[in-house]
Image (cartoon, rainbow, N blue to C red):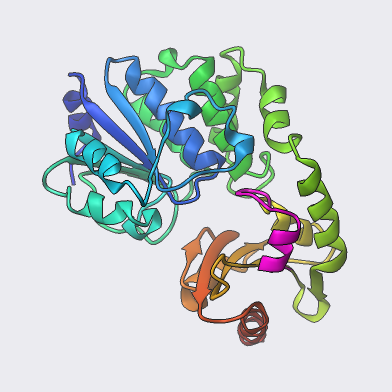
Amino acid sequence: MHNFSTLKEFLEEPRKVVIIPHTKPDADAIGSALGLSWYLRKDEHITTVLSPNDYPSFLHWMPGHEEVVIYDKEKPEIAETIIEEADVIVCVDFSSLNRIEELGPLVRNSISKKTIVMIDHHRGKEEFADYELWDIDAAAAAQLIYEFIDLDEGIQKIDQRIAACLYAGLITDTGSFKFPSVSSRTLRIAASLKDTGLDTARIYNLIYDNNTETRLRFLGYALGENLTFWPELNTGFFTVSQDDRDRFNLQSGDTEGLVNYALSVNGIKIAALFKEKDERDGIKVSFRSIGDFSVADLSAEHFNGGGHKNAAGGRIDGITIDEAVAKFKKVLQEKLK
C-alpha cells in the first residue's frame, strides 16, 4: 500500500486511466466515475469509463454518458484492450472485485502490472489496490471523489460538469441528505458544488421527477398489491416477480427507491425488496433500516451480500421469492429475540 502523495506524483504526467464503477451502477457509482474522468482530463490524462453493464436511462443526462463503454459479453476483447492499454485502473464505489462481474478477473490479472486505485465507502474491503481511499463513514463515493480532488489540490478545477456528476451521487446515496451517514462535511461538499453555479433543482428533477408512465403505474401496483407488513417485527417488504417485470416492461432502475416506501411507514424500522432475477432461479434483495439494526450484517450472514449498516443488498440463487421471504422472516425472528 502506497501513500496517496506518491499517486499525485505519478499523475503529474499524462496517463491512460480506466475508471470502473460497480455492476449495475447507480447514480453514485456512474456519477463518481464520470466526475473523476472529467477532472483527470483537465490534466491531460486520457480516460475511459468502463461499466460492467448498463445503467438506468434516467441517468443518461450525465455529462459524458455517451462515452461510457459498456462491457459486452459478446465482444469481451473491447474491455480487454481498454484495460491492457491503461496505465491506471481506478475502481469506484466498490472494494471487492466480485462486484464487477466479468471485469473482475481482468482487473485481478492486472495486479502488479498496472497502478490500481480503489475509492469506496462500503464494508468488506478486499486487498487488491496499490492506493486506497476507503472510508465507510463517507456518505457516498462522490464524497470521496471530492476528497481525492482535494488531496490533489484541485478543488478550483471543479466546474459545473464535474459538480453535476458528483452532486447526483451525493443526493442519491444520502436519500437527498436525510440518511444518518450525512455529516457536516457532506453538506459542505454539496455547498461547494453548488458554488460552481450548479442548478441543483434541475439535478433533482432529472433523477427523481423523470418517471415513465409505466414506472409510475408499476409503483401504484407495487404499493397496492406487493407490499406486506409484519408489525410484530417492525418490518415491511415488497416482492417483484418476473411476471410483474414483464407486465410493466420494467427496465434497469425502475425499482430504484421502491424499498424506501416501506420504511416510510410509521413504526417500520426494517424494509426489504425481493426481486426475482431474469433466470427465475434466484432472488436479488435490497435491505434498509432505521436505527441500530444492521442490514449489512444480516445481508452478509444470510444473503451473500453486504453494504452499509442501514442500506445493503444481497442475492440468493436456486430459491423462489416465497422461500426467500420465509428465510428473511426466520432470520429476523432470531435476531430480534
Residue 326: quadrant of the picture: bottom right
The location of residue 268, given as percent across then percent down, is: 78, 66
Q: Magenta stretch: residue 222 in it?
A: no
Identity of the residue drawn at 68% across and 82% down:
322
Residue at horizontal 29 percent and vertical 48 percent from the top: 76
Spot occupied by residue 114 in the image (x, y as percentages of width and height): 16, 40
**What span is colored magenta in the figure?**
239-254
In front here: 75 or 214? 75
Asked whether the viewer can see residue 266, the reply is yes
Task: Name the spot of residue 169 as percent of width and height, x first.
Answer: 55, 37
In the shown orientation, is residue 96 left or right of residue 89? right
Number of numbered markers = 0
- Quadrant assignment for the C terminus: bottom right
Is 278 in front, or is 43? 278
Instruction: Judge whether residue 249 is colored magenta.
Output: yes
Residue 50 lies in what quarter of the image? top left
> Residue at 71% across / 67% down in the picture?
243
